[in-house]
Image: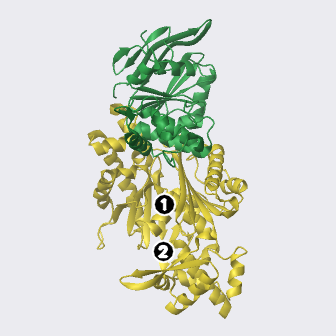
Chain colours: A yellow, B green
Amino acid sequence: MHVSGDDGAGTRVPAPSGRYPRGMARERLTPGSQTSLREANRERIVRAVQQRGSLTQVELAAVTGLSAASVSNIVKELSAAGVVTTTPTSRSGRRAQQVSLARNLGLVAGVHFGDRTLRVALADVTHRVVADQRLPLAPDHRPDVGLDRTALLLEEMLDALDTSRSELLGVGVGLPAPVDQRTGGVSGFGLLRGWDGVDVPAVLADRLGVEVHVDNDANLGALAEARLGAGQGHRHVAYVTVARGIGLGLVVDGGVVHGRGGAAGEIGHIRVVEGGPLCRCGNRGCLETVAGTGAVVDRLRRTHGHLAVRDVLFRAQQGDVECRAAVAEAGEALARGLAAVVAVAAPDVIVVGGELAAAGDALLGPVRATLPEHVLPTAAGPVEVVPAVLGSQAEVRGAVALALDAYRVGSPAGLGAGLEVTR
Amino acid sequence: MSEPVLSLRGITQAFGAVRALVDVDLDVHPREVVAVVGENGAGKTTLVRVMAGDLVPDAGEVVVDGVEVALTSPGVARQLGIATVYQDLALCQDLDVVENIFLGREPQRGLVLDEVAMEAEAQRLLAQLAARVPSVRVPLTQLSGGQRQAVAIARALLGEPRALVLDEPTASLGITQTAEVLSLIERIRDRGHGVVLVSHNMADVQAVADRVVVLRRGRLAGQFDADRVSYEEIIAAITGASAGPTPTRRSGR
């Protein structure tokens, strides 16, 4: 298992995670001259601001490990070059300088292909969403139509904002299947009909003319919740999305764990029922066949007929006993899958998102109650299980973060030139 | 499952020698989107006209909330809680949003129109549709296709109809507007209305429908649970490539 997608310049080279603190691994990449050190520090600050949207100089010093004086100097420099802006604010009663990236650097797009919805968000470099749109999708939507519609939607959204495509800095895409980080294509078989072997980054980059980065949607949800949502302040964050499929993303010290072929976290296909129902992956009794929304809806079909997932949630909330039971049953099964995650990664917090998470405690209650029965009791107590703060936006916000992480502030012409002058 | 709000039984209609509809049954339940699909000339528009009260069929019965009714005019259909939005929307381009929503049904206070109540109600309707309309006092000419569709739907929702019939609501719309209209259909359904969605676009139909009904040459050619049917199966039913009629078809007549 190797960790990648970390916050620093080290992402290009697989870092030997675990043995060194992340910061050290990164520093070893820069030669020791005064200038390169300065440049590395500048990049660190830009990265830190980029990842968190905005933070104070004091927080910047804490996050980057640089002295308050160097932070102050570098921020001044970056501000003069138009890369960041500072606004006076206060923290615990003291005056402070809030640092954020200059909004006019451009826009990035986040795209999430859900089971039944396509979400597209346009955000500026401070993670502020300036436009978003959702499009309901057919149950087995195809890549050709889906990617085409994504490109059209993005173009229309840019038009509506009176911005041109040249202001688009990058696109992040989340897919509900494991994504091979080397190719950006779907690496799991049978999960998304028609998507196997489709070169998603190339198809979209061709249409939009910008860099496109693709990842698994649960990984992106994890990234967003870890940085901007319920996982803030935790080192090990697991995010599980419960929709038709069940996916899990693991963020360890800020970096998403991808694993071989991008398949880390595919807990939806752990067998939890011997000889259970046939799964779309080809095996039997997978977690998603008992805890996915398809299973919940199917369980209710005999008593309630056809229901959309939204109907189940609505009825559960209204106190429909069968609907609550079906959701609870999914929660108990989910806990068995999560037990494996707790055993392997022992996250500080498990954030639950996806369509079924909207059921709230009707789902989370049974998870919290069942999970301790399947894991080793430790002095740290049972793991916290909390709802996603970003709700249905988690994955698309993570896609924005992915695009932002891949975009290197200061590298394009213009910005880079600005920095040269102030050096 | 709840009782249907609207049922059509054995609807048959001929225009001269052309049999536009032959023995067509259709049920619409609350919180349900029923999509009616078929090729051009399959009878979709005739069916819409029957539900709108624009056309009294040669044979067959219409049941609303368990009571057999005669939809003899569009006014009657509306009173019974069946609202129809045609493809051309039937809106007045130079009137503003409020005037369009209330056209012909303006609330009066004495001899004057109650403008304040109208504006408040228009805003309430558009807000519950989460429709993005810049102002309720702009003329329709300043709105996009999707926004006009939202106004037409808001107009149809005035008076809380039980069933809403939408004829090709996404035809001639851009992708952003299509996205908004499809989200709108989901919200109308979730508020408890029954929706009949007549459309050519299979991607849109499969995105929001709970049930798909296929018409072919005026006859029912298939009825599917939208969760479980593939695009290919629907197309096969539309073109007549699939064998035999529908498994879920009601019999006994």
What residue does disc 1 label? A221
The answer as to whether the residues below labels 2 and 1 share one chain is: yes
Q: Which of A325 and A342 is in front in this view?
A: A325
Q: Residue B141 carries which label?
A: none
Chain hosting mark 2: A
Amino acid marked by disc 1: Gly
Using the numbered discs, state the Cα–Cα distance from disc 2 to disc 1 in whole angstroms.
16 Å
What residue does disc 2 label? A253
Residue projecting furthest to the top: B17
Q: Is there any visible trace of residue B26 in the rendered image?
A: yes
Q: Is there any visible trace of residue A141 in the rendered image?
A: no
Task: Give percent across and percent down for residue B185.
Answer: 48, 38
> Does residue A69 lie above or below B148 as drawn?
below
Task: Give percent across and percent down for residue A247.
Answer: 48, 55
Q: Which of A206 and A255 is in front in this view?
A: A206
Mark 1 surroundings within 10 Å by alpha-carbon count, few (fewer than 14), some (14 through 19), many (20 or more): many
Task: Give percent across and percent down for residue B205.
Answer: 54, 34
Residue projecting furthest to the front: B111
Instruction: Tell me whether circle 2 and circle 1 mark residues in contact (CB < 8 Å).
Output: no
* Image quarter (top left, top right, bottom left or bottom right) of the N terminus of chain A: bottom right
Mark 2 or mark 1, whichever is nearer to me = 1
Chain hosting mark 1: A
Q: Residue at x 52, y 88 (%)?
A: A66
Q: First in sequence: mark 2 or mark 1?
A: 1
